Image: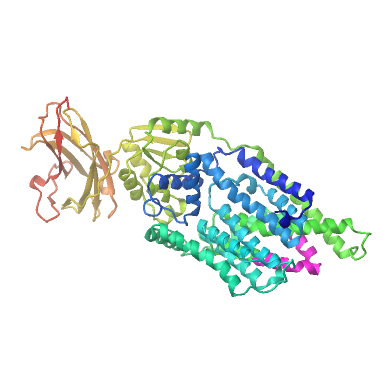
Amino acid sequence: MGRLIGRDWRVALCWALLIVLYLVWPLTHLEAYRWTNDEGLYMQRAALTNAGYPLYAETAFNKPPLLVWILKSAYRLGGPTVSTARVAVLPLTMLGFVSVGFLGTQLWGKWRGVAAMVLLLGLAEVPVRAHVVMADLPAMSLGLTSLVGAVLFQRRGGRGWLVLSGTALAGAVLIHPMQTYWSVPLAAVLIFPQVVPEGSKSRERAGLLDVLSLIVPMVLLGLVVLAVVDRQGFLTWVLRSNYEAAAAIPLAENWEMLTGFLMDNWPLMGLSVASTALLSASRGRRGPLGLLAVWGSVTLATLLVLSPLWRQYLIFLAFPLVMVSAAGVVSAAEGLLQIGQDNSLDRGFQTVLAVLTIAGLVIFGVHRWCATAPQLLRSPVWSSDHVLARAFITEEVPPEGFVASDDALLTFAAGRLVPPPFTEATKKQIELGTFTREDAVDGMLRYDARGAVFGTGRLKRLPGYETWIREVAVEHRAFGDTRVYRLDLPRREPRSAMGLFENGVELMGYALSRGRLRPGDEVTVMLFWRTTESLHEDYHIFVHLTDQDGRLWGQHDGQPVRGNRPSSRWQTNTLVYDSHEVTLSPDAPEETCQIRVGMYPWPSLTRVPVLRPDGRRWPGDTVVLTELEVASEGD
């Protein structure tokens, strides 16, 4: 490391202090509540795959698997906790922080590398997001490492640096596909070696073996990933899902977000402009400026066409600006210190640029301190409402029970997992329509969810979903804006259509809360309805418990979904989940009982004719779902 940053003890001390400063805030806020659903979903995916629900096959994910694999490994060492996940991410982002220092040192000199790290710490997002479990900064950190490897190859020789570069770039893409844009600055370094200063190796274009040293590790790592993941699921989620999201690129919206970010960071923009002008006046420093121009341009172009463009990605633009600003600040300081000693530097134009650059540094420092200090001094702790909600989930939901949630971090911190399909419940997938209300209910029934949490508003985008949860919940508690439901739902068994009613309604299947009954027991019968035609009448549903002779021993009649979803409001080709609680009479005989279902318009009570799947009519226009054993009280 001494060869890469210089052997000056002062530089080494600065590096050590800066790394400590970088780690202080995240290590003292490992349990902070901040990024809610986005961060929680990554933690949930890793925990689900550790629990045996494979990525892509069951656990939905629209990015490559490397970050989830890293979290999985961390869980096996430290347990599936919020702190473990964040400690696992911190070294990745710190690698990017250190890479900025290495890159500045190799392009501009040792003190420029130190200055780049200092300026980077001045961005509020850097220390605050250093340990956040999301893909953007870890992936970018590996991209920065790949650029450092290519620069070191041109300055020092040795294809090992290119192997490092290719491996790091593959890692970046295997965390977030967007990081493929790093291939452009890498190509610039290899094709135009004059963009890096001369080192111990004479600069020359990369040859075929050099290119292969870069590409082969990327290809091998990609093949390894395809060999161990569910390839069909991988291609579906990573390629098709992202293609659908990018089908319509909102250039105008992205441009507005990008310009807004740059205007909000006007001190950094001004500092980078003054630094660029100062560095351009020195012929020996124009090469690295070209590399940074390529890096900044391709970053801007990538973000411009990205769909959707999330706000956290905008920080990518700050990194090339920080690099050029750091070089300009140190050059300005050196120039001002040598005025009067070296006449070649005592020139009015360069002096003015140097003064402007230092003035930009002061403005940047003041502005960033005012913006950063409140975020660093205000600890994002869990609110009392979140603490109470978390305790309620822990106490009321069994450890093996799943919790459907739009606050995956809260659920994970309570030690509970979301049903695997709910890892798809992101804002993007809900807006695209790939995760619907029917998907949510189906996932809850299939994985026997025992709780539901509504807090961030994401699941409110599924019309009628929380209404259905409220109707079938055993208990409901509100903690501020967070609402927690305790459930005891029957598990859904996949079945084909069991009856087609004359009015166009299909009984698609059912689920039961229990497999046997005692006299006096209650059974929840969940019915799955679908209509192929618009209904203009409100029908009542009946569920009967009968013996073999047809005698009635329990019944429930009423409008669907406890009256909250009249059939006249059903949408065509949309599943309706309709639960009925039926109590078996205490006088029921100890034999099997049949569960019968039908419907009738009110108030005529005339049953709607219903056909079997084979086209024959059900006797009495009543669908027989199944038979249950009735056991004695002592069984």
Residue 521 placement (x, y as % from top left): 20, 29
- The correct choice, above or below, for 363 with respect to 381 in the image is below
- The correct choice, above or below, for 425 with respect to 343 in the image is above
- Looking at the image, can residue 375 be seen? no
Residue 444 placement (x, y as % from top left): 34, 44
Query: Residue at the location (8% across, 35% down)?
Result: 551
Decide if residue 208 is on the left or right side of residue 47.
right
Decide if residue 307 is on the left or right side of residue 584.
right
**276 in the magenta segment:** yes
Which residue, as the protein is rendered here, is positioned at the far top? 634
Decide if residue 38 is on the left or right side of residue 210.
left
Image quarter where the N terminus lies is bottom right
In front of the other: 143 or 586: 143
In front of the other: 355 or 217: 217
Secondary structure mainly formed by the magenta segment: helix
**The magenta stretch spans which residues?**
270-294
